[in-house]
Amino acid sequence: MKVVNFGEKYDVPSALALGFFDCVHKGHAEVIAKAKELAAKSGSECAVMTFRGDPGTFFNKKKRIYSFEERLEALGGLGVDAVIAADFDESFAALDAEDFLGRLLSDCKVTAVAVGEDYTYGKGAQGSARTLSESLADRNITASVVPLLCRNGVKISSTEIKTLLESGGIEAVNDMLTEPYFMLGTVSHARGRGNTFGYPTANIPYDGGKVYPAPGVYATTVTVEGRTFLGGTNIGAKPTFGDNSPSVETFILDFSGDIYGKLIKLRFFKRLRGIEKFPSAEALAAQLDRDVAHIREYFAEEAK
């Protein structure tokens, strides 16, 4: 999958899906599927436009769900050929609707466009799916507006997913995403306490710009160098050791080896419990044994 900077020339004919695609949920997948359909009809590539940073951060709104690298991972899983990546900065935010569209169409050979029906663009969100369709029709470019996708009567949206994440509703989140909620990170050195309990651990950096699942212990899988292991991930503080700084620490089952400095993918499946302060390291070790049993039981049931 190619990544092209917004503002650079890209002369490959492309059917383009427009949006932020913060977490690549099933509603986003519908838009991308329409772009792929339009691409197939015209013999074009399927491209997606997204942002390297987070428009929400620029406007002091709620933090993002996925990093840019995580969005690329999710988009690649949907068979996207190219990503047009824009930096959401002051100059981009100042573009009015027609200026944005003019720049996009002058830099890219767009054969068709797909958007969700709530899509907006341009300074102050002055452009809509309707105005986009009208502007593209004047240029003889096909535009397809995809209806919103709902779950239990509620629109699938990044806002709803953020709310569910913060409440620990990871299973409901996964029902809305195109793949289980995940994190990418490079394993860093920590205190290595997990090894003393018989469970090797992997710490990845905590990103203060992201919305994380509610603090607690989760049943996860850990993929490293193409191999996937069962795991349990602690998000939040470690009060048993007097450590109140937030972290993402995963103990990996049935694994031995050195993965420091390696990129891993954590997939989240179920919240097992909240954060607890145990009276001793031995009490924590006993709880970890119970957590491991619960994790094995959960994945054994899922595999049936």
Image (cartoon, helix red, strand yellow):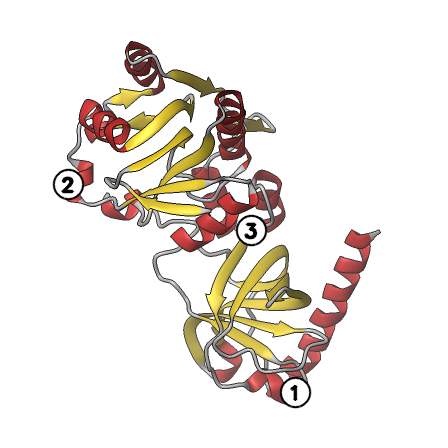
Q: Label 1 is placed on what type of residue?
A: Glu
- Position of 217 relative to 240 (above/below): above
- Position of 191 relative to 247 (above/below): below
**Residue 119 seen anywhere in this rendered image of the structure:** no
The residue where tag 3 is placed is 181
The residue where tag 1 is placed is 282
Q: Nearer the viewer, residue 141 or 153?
A: 141
Picture coordinates of residue 179, whole percent (x, y): 60, 46
Q: Nearer the viewer, residue 214 or 266?
A: 266
Q: Residue at x 43, y 49 (%)?
A: 65
Q: Earlier in the sequence, mark 1 or mark 3?
A: 3
Q: Secondary structure at mark 1?
A: helix
- Position of 158 relative to 118 (above/below): below
Picture coordinates of residue 51, whole percent (x, y): 33, 44
- Circles 1, 2 touching at the beta carbon (< 8 Å): no
Q: Nearer the viewer, residue 270 or 102?
A: 102
Picture coordinates of residue 281, whole percent (x, y): 60, 87
**Residue 63 seen anywhere in this rendered image of the structure:** yes
Q: Secondary structure at mark 3?
A: loop
| Dot 2 crowding, Cα within 10 Å, few <14, some 14–19, many 20+ | few
In the drawing, does residue 129 fall left or right of residue 292? left
Q: Secondary structure at mark 2?
A: helix
In the drawing, does residue 29 fall left or right of residue 208? right
Q: Earlier in the sequence, mark 1 or mark 2?
A: 2
Quadrant housing residue 223: bottom right
In this rendering, which labeled residue sits more in front, label 1 or label 3?
3
Q: Residue at x 35, y 61 (%)?
A: 208
Quadrant housing residue 4: top left
Cα separation between marks 1 and 3: 32 Å
The residue where tag 2 is placed is 91
